[in-house]
Image (tube, grey):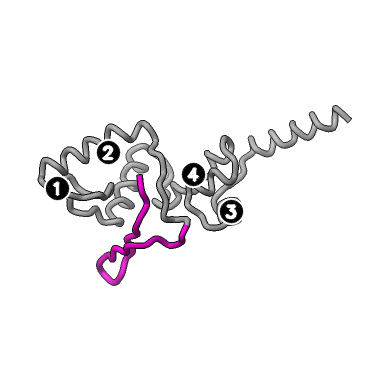
């Protein structure tokens, strides 16, 4: 998937810009395999409506999905599943934190499209009790060898 533009609120509407916030935000990311069937079905339904779009956030007839709709839909999902309400953007924080336990900081930075790794590590990645426990165990292991 290619990240090539942004949609931002302006007044009572939204403005699509053909650029991203930073140079590194403009990127190609490999899809999570479980999303491929959904995206293929979306592309087919858009083709069936004879609409040509290269947008993921589009209705089957090709009309763009408003960003506020996505936020409201996430709120409904959280409510339906008895989960705490989060902002749509918080999904990036969750992804960064989950990936940080499995990937290098540079890989997480590239996935999120951050210009500077300090943004990734200081703003998006949050430690957990498990992380702190793992660090303590690792230090015990190192000290035991000395």
Question: Which sits earlier in the primary sequence, circle 3 or circle 2?
Answer: 2
Question: Which sits earlier in the primary sequence, circle 1 or circle 3?
Answer: 1
Spatial CA distance of label 4 from label 3 is: 17 Å
| Element under disc 3 | helix
Residue ID for mark 1: 61
Q: Is residue 133 left or right of residue 99?
A: right
Question: Which sits earlier in the primary sequence, circle 2 or circle 1?
Answer: 2
| Mark 2 neighbour class, 10 Å CA radius: few under 14, some 14 to 19, many 20 or more | few
Residue ID for mark 4: 94
Looking at the image, which residue is at 69% across and 34% down?
133
Residue ID for mark 2: 39
Question: Which sits earlier in the primary sequence, circle 2 or circle 4?
Answer: 2
Spatial CA distance of label 3 from label 2 is: 30 Å
Q: Where residue 59 appears, x then y in whole percent?
A: 19, 48
Q: Quadrant of the N terminus?
A: top left
Is residue 4 on the magenta stretch?
yes
Looking at the image, which residue is at 10% across and 44% down?
49
Q: Where residue 71 appears, x then y in whole percent?
A: 33, 52
Establish if 20 lies above or below 92: below
Q: Depth check: 21 or 128 in front?
A: 21
Q: Is residue 36 left or right of residue 46?
A: right
Q: Where residue 27 appears, x then y in whole percent?
A: 42, 51
Q: Which residues are magenta?
A: 1-23
Nearest-to-viewer mark from 2 and 4? 2
Question: Which sits earlier in the primary sequence, circle 4 or circle 3?
Answer: 4
Residue ID for mark 3: 117
Q: Quadrant of the C terminus?
A: top right
Which disc number belongs to residue 74? none
Looking at the image, which residue is at 33% across and 35% down?
35
| Mark 1 neighbour class, 10 Å CA radius: few under 14, some 14 to 19, many 20 or more | some
């Amino acid at each position: 998937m290619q990240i090539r533009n942004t949609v931002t609120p302006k007044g009572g509407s939204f403005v699509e810009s053909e650029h991203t916030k930073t140079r590194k935000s403009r990127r190609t990311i490999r899809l999570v395999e479980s999303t491929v069937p959904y995206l293929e079905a979306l592309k087919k339904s858009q083709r069936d409506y004879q609409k040509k779009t290269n947008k993921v956030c589009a209705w089957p007839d090709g009309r763009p999905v408003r960003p506020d709709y996505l936020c409201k839909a996430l709120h409904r999902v959280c409510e339906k599943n008895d989960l705490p309400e989060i902002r749509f953007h918080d999904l990036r924080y969750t992804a960064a934190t989950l990936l940080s336990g499995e990937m290098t900081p540079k890989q997480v930075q590239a996935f999120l499209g951050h210009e500077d790794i300090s943004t990734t590590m200081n703003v998006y990645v949050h430690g957990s009790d498990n992380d702190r426990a793992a660090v303590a165990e690792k230090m015990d292991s190192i000290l035991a060898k000395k």
